[in-house]
């Protein structure tokens, strides 16, 4: 596609429910990243993939968070048993993976846990 | 280890005056450096990038940054601020040997006074 696409744009869920956030990267981009951004803060790294392989998941806050990219394209970030502290903007970015190519960000998913 | 320090959390300038947003990095290897801008309630947009070519990098909207290895700095400048420059700015460092991991600074909020 023309850019990184994230869905849904907004998600409101009740505490304890599971949510799945989707990211469709730029076509052909090898690397895909997930970040979380709280209001007034910078992006906080969660995890990233090269192709389908999860290279680094050290930023995932706890085992309720998981991510996959099974076919090396679309990725899903899943949060189980959501808590109010999970409320944030979740941003996905992709890069071509050739040398140091910049990140291209999607518009994010605003998650609100009530 | 890599890290990025943005020395000012807030910068305020008058319209038409120069802008200076400071960024220092620590890196054991030759880094790639980026500046991103985020306007209120918008996504992150790449302003410019340094990847070991010319040390003075020109970006969009009249912004420039100069890579100074001796000072481990990558400050962002613009000769004349415009009202539309009011936004949050993030300095980002990456090193290829870490598998294309990107590290964000905490951000600088730029206010432009009319």
Image (cartoon, grey):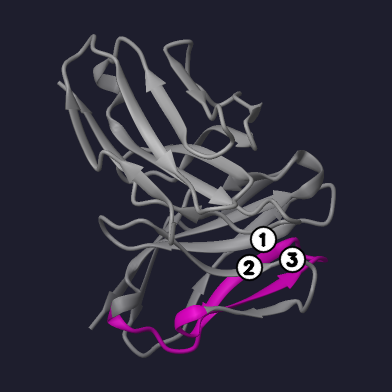
Sequence-wise, the earlier of marks 2 and 1 is: 1
Left or right, residue B23 beside residue A93: right
| Whether residue B58 is visible | yes
Q: Which chain is indicated by disc 1? A: B
Among all residues in the image, which is located at the extreme front? A71
The answer to whether the residues at label 2 and label 1 have Cβ atoms under 8 Å apart is yes
Q: Which chain is indicated by disc 2? A: B
| Residue B33 tag number | 1
Q: Quadrant of residue A47?
A: top right
| Residue assigned mark 2 | B49
Residue drawn at 48 percent across, 19 percent down: A66
**Rendering coords of residue A68 (x, y %):** 52, 25
Q: Which residues are magenta?
A: B60-83
Q: Are marks 1 and 3 on the same chain?
A: yes
| Residue assigned mark 3 | B51
Residue drawn at 42 percent across, 12 percent down: A64
Q: Between B11 and B2, which is closer to the camera in this rendering?
A: B2
* Cα distance between the residues tagged 2 and 1: 6 Å
Q: Is residue B4 magenta?
A: no
| Secondary structure of residue under mark 3 | loop
Left or right, residue B46 beside residue B56: left
Q: Residues within 10 Å of mark 1 (few under 14, many from 20)?
A: many
């Amino acid at each position: 596609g023309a850019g990184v696409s994230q869905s849904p744009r907004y998600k409101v869920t009740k505490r304890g429910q599971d949510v799945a956030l989707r990211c469709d990267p730029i076509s052909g981009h090898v690397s895909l990243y997930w970040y979380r951004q709280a209001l007034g803060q910078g992006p906080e790294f969660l995890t990233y993939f090269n192709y389908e392989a999860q290279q680094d998941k050290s930023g995932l806050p706890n085992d309720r968070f998981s991510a996959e990219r099974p076919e090396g394209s679309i990725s899903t970030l899943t949060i189980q048993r959501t808590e109010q502290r999970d409320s944030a903007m979740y941003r996905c970015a992709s890069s071509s993976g050739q040398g140091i190519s910049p990140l291209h960000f999607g518009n994010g998913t605003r998650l609100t846990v009530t | 280890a890599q890290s990025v320090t943005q020395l000012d959390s807030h910068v305020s300038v008058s319209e038409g005056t120069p802008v200076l947003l400071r960024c220092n990095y620590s890196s054991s290897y030759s880094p790639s450096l980026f500046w991103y801008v985020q306007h209120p309630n918008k996504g992150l947009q790449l302003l410019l990038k340094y990847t070991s070519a010319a040390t003075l990098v020109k970006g969009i909207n009249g912004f420039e940054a100069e890579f100074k290895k001796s000072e481990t700095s990558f400050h962002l400048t613009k000769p004349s601020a415009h009202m539309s420059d009011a936004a949050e700015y993030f300095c980002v460092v990456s090193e290829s040997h870490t598998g294309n991991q990107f590290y964000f600074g905490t951000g600088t909020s730029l206010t432009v006074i009319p």
